[in-house]
Amino acid sequence: MRNFNARPGSTRGVWLIISAAVFWGTVGPTTQTLYALTATNALSIGFFRLAFALPLLALACWRLFGRRSLALPRRDLLLIVGLGALVALYQVLYFAAIARAGVAIAA
């Protein structure tokens, strides 16, 4: 397992935080732009966002943890599926809120 602790004088942690903030902060305006340019809905935006993210996150997990990333206890499988369903629901509700109330209020 890789150690992600920042060394003194290292700027890696700062860049990770900046990257996360940029990605987090651009979701709302990007979604609002998609609504303006296309005839789409919250369900399709949420689906495609998660469909594109899944392979990327799976690859990152595999590179970080290897085979251990697949070693899940059976009792945790239902919890993982439930959390995945709640994340998908959150995405759809957030994108629906952007369509109805605008990005400033939804965020």
Image (cartoon, rainbow, N blue to C red):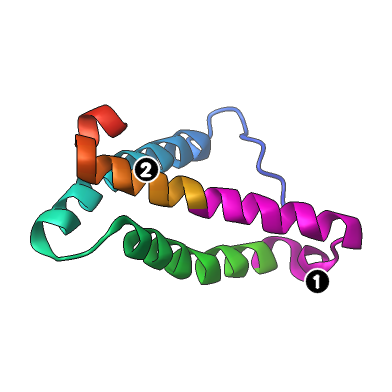
Which comes sooner in the sequence, label 2 or label 1? 1
Q: Residue furthest left?
A: 37
Residue 70 lies within the magenta run: yes
42 to the left or right of 51:
left
Q: Which mark is residue 36?
A: none
- Give the number of marks: 2
- Say which quadrant the N terminus sits in: bottom right
Q: Secondary structure at mark 1?
A: helix
* Along the viewing direction, whichever of 15 and 10 lies nearer the viewer: 15
Q: Is residue 52 magenta?
A: no
User: Which residue is painted at 58% across and 48% down in the image?
Assistant: 86
Q: Are marks 2 and 1 in contact (CB under 8 Å)?
A: no
Q: Closer to the camera, 54 or 66?
A: 54
Q: x, y (%) of residue 85?
A: 59, 55
Disc sitting over residue 94 in the figure: 2
Residue 75 lies left or right of residue 21; in this view the side is right
* Crowding near the residue tagged with mark 2, few <14, some 14–19, many ≥20 C-alpha atoms within 10 Å: some
Q: What x and y, as percent, mark residue 6?
A: 61, 34
Please tell me which residue lies in front, 63 or 80: 80
Mark 2: which secondary structure?
helix
Circle nearer the viewer, 2 or 1: 2
Residue denoted by label 1: 67
Task: State whether residue 73 appears in this view.
Answer: no
The overriding secondary structure of the stretch rendered in magenta is helix
Name the amino acid, label 2: Tyr
Q: Which residues are magenta?
A: 63-88
Q: Is 99 drawn above or below residue 62 in the view shown?
A: above
Q: CA distance from mark 2 to mark 1?
A: 34 Å
